[in-house]
Image (cartoon, rainbow, N blue to C red):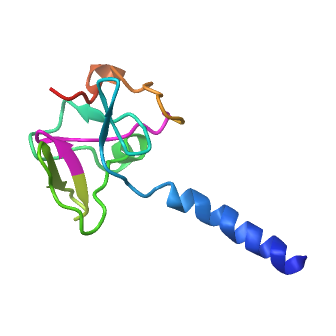
């Protein structure tokens, strides 16, 4: 029983780490989402092809990161972040999730401070 409990604990601890993996982009009801259905956002202060949301900003607005080995496709490009990591962009606008969106379909970040907007295909 002791070994089983540790195995269950190990699996339980691994599951949240797996949820951080980024998956391909999709369009759901006219909104760009992660492959897991989480809403994506753009930031008005970003320049085309460049993210200015770093440090504390990136904790509230996690960048939608590119998995190793993935490549730009169609309207989706890749921007290099200050930390050297790669982030997805749509038509040059870097894409983010919102930390307070907890479940598929949440869109609680839209319009925050007048500079965060739901990413929509155009």
Image quadrant where one finds the N terminus:
bottom right
Numbered range of the magenta stretch: 88-101
- Please identify the dominant SS of the magenta region: loop
Quarter of the image for residue 97 reads top left
Q: Is residue 4 magenta?
A: no
Q: Residue 61's spot in the image, x, y percent?
A: 37, 41
**Nearer-the-camera pick, 101 or 22:** 22
At x 74%, y 67%, the residue is 9
At x 32%, y 22%, the residue is 113
Q: Residue 18's spot in the image, x, y percent?
A: 51, 60
Q: Is residue 92 magenta?
A: yes
Say how many tags the image has: 0
Q: Residue 6's spot in the image, x, y percent?
A: 78, 74
Name the outermost residue toward the right: 1
At x 82%, y 75%, the residue is 4
Image quadrant where one finds the C terminus:
top left
Q: Is residue 9 left or right of residue 94?
A: right
Quarter of the image for residue 98 reads top left
Name the outermost residue toward the bottom: 3
Quarter of the image for residue 48 reads top left
Q: Is residue 95 left or right of residue 14?
A: left
| Image: 69 above or below 52 | below
| Image: 16 above or below 110 | below
At x 28%, y 25%, the residue is 117
Q: Residue 42's spot in the image, x, y percent?
A: 25, 33
Q: Is residue 119 left or right of residue 71?
A: right
**Nearer-the-camera pick, 109 or 19:** 19
């Amino acid at each position: 029983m002791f070994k089983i409990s540790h195995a269950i604990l190990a699996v339980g601890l691994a599951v949240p780490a797996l949820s951080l993996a980024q998956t391909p982009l999709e369009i759901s009801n006219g909104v760009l989402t992660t492959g897991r259905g989480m809403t994506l956002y753009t930031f008005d202060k970003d320049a085309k092809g460049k993210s200015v949301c770093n440090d504390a900003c990136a904790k509230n607005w996690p960048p939608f990161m590119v998995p190793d080995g993935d490549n730009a496709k169609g309207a989706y490009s890749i921007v290099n972040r200050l930390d050297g990591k790669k982030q997805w962009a749509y038509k040059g606008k870097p894409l983010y999730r919102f930390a307070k969106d907890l479940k598929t379909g949440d869109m609680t970040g839209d319009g925050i401070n007048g500079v965060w907007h739901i990413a929509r295909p155009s």
